[in-house]
Image: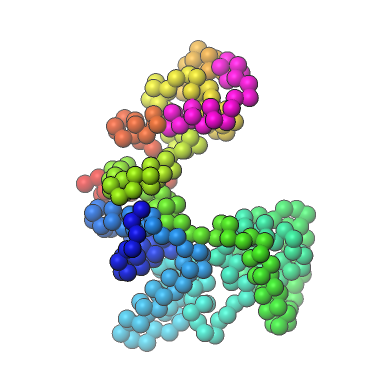
Amino acid sequence: MPVGLPEQRERVAQILVALGPDRAARMLKSLPEPKVRQLASDMATIQMTPEEAREVLKDFTKELLEKQTKPAGIDFAKRVLTQLYGADEGREIARSIDPKSTRPFAWIATLDPDDVAKGLAAEPPATIAVALAHLDPGVSAKVLRKLKDPKRSDVAMRVASLSSVAPDVVEAIDDAMRDRLASRLGDSGQTVEGVSLLVDVLIQSSPKLQKAIVESIRGQDEKLAVEIQERLFVFDDIIMLNDRAIQQVLKSIETMDLAFGLQSASEEIQDLIFRNLSERARDSLKEEIEYLQNPKAAEVKAARGRVVAVVRELEESGAIEIERPGAEDQDDEED
């Protein structure tokens, strides 16, 4: 993996990673392919905590505002942030820039809702209610959805019944909760990983651009390129194939590999496979699946790997297309 990036290149890569896959993909789409390849390689080297990512965005925004030729003010900053990062993230960053706005519990918005729910499981419902009442409704809804009943219902009732809480009490709860969640969650799930971000961006790109970037990275780090390629399409992504593509894939797969691969597969995947088989082939496959009893996990994984390899090969040859979400407007990349 490349190390020691020039300072300016590293900063650009950090900004792209901090922006997230959707916005990074839109920005990369307007650049020439050689530049996209370079930035993709740089992004794959970046790892940041959510707090570090927010600091990168804040610094970047401050620089943009300082370059304005007329006084901007916090209202202008909010408009810029909303355009750059979306309404929710824009509001949060604007609050952190505005010296008059130090909103309690804003740090919760930087964490994964699953992690937050896990950390809040041991908190009293009344404490959780105070925290959620000080967050944007969208963030509160995500956290509340992840809590389990009866705690979720209890917290919802307490939020509804809140009237006012003294500022010093809110501050004390905020500080104590931040410390407790940090000790419960540790560092798990708290990094923004460049590889994952790059995979999310590539999923929204054309097969041609995917291949070009992976091959470019392969020239620098074979292991990293293989990891990215494997994560671009996994067995569960078969649901992104239409009936015609599935029929092409089924022509090249051994029945036994399919039988192993469908072990514990979702009903959606099984239905997709079965409806694209002839009655005879469907009955034969079901017999094979019933015959297999408690197959080893390694056997299932290996069989799924062979199925995925067939899908990748067919896509690269142009025989099938994978209908990836967000990749509908990629025609310009094919030029």
Q: Is residue 214 above or below residue 38?
A: above
Which residue is nearer to you in this view: 241 or 291? Answer: 291
Colour scheme in the image?
A: rainbow
Q: Please tell me which residue is depicted at 59% across the width and 25% down the height of the picture.
A: 295
Residue 47 image position (x, y, % from top left): 45, 60
Segment colored magenta: 287-308
Q: Is residue 7 magenta?
A: no
Magenta span: helix, strand or loop, mainly?
helix
Residue 159 image position (x, y, % from top left): 73, 67
Residue 144 image position (x, y, % from top left): 67, 59
Q: Is residue 304 magenta?
A: yes
Residue at the bottom extreme of this rendering: 71
Q: Please tell me which residue is depicted at 48% across the width and 59% down the height of the picture.
A: 192
Which residue is nearer to you in this view: 39 or 140? Answer: 39
Which residue is nearer to you in this view: 59 or 207? Answer: 59
Q: Is residue 313 above or below residue 210?
A: above
Q: Is residue 184 above or below residue 322?
A: below
Q: Please tell me which residue is depicted at 48% across the width and 23% down the height of the picture.
A: 257
**Would residue 251 appear left or right of 273 to someone viewing this image?**
left
Residue 120 shows in this picture: yes
Disc tally is: 0
Residue 80 image position (x, y, % from top left): 40, 73
Q: Is residue 180 above or below residue 59?
A: above
Residue at the top extreme of this rendering: 280
Residue at the left extreme of this rendering: 335
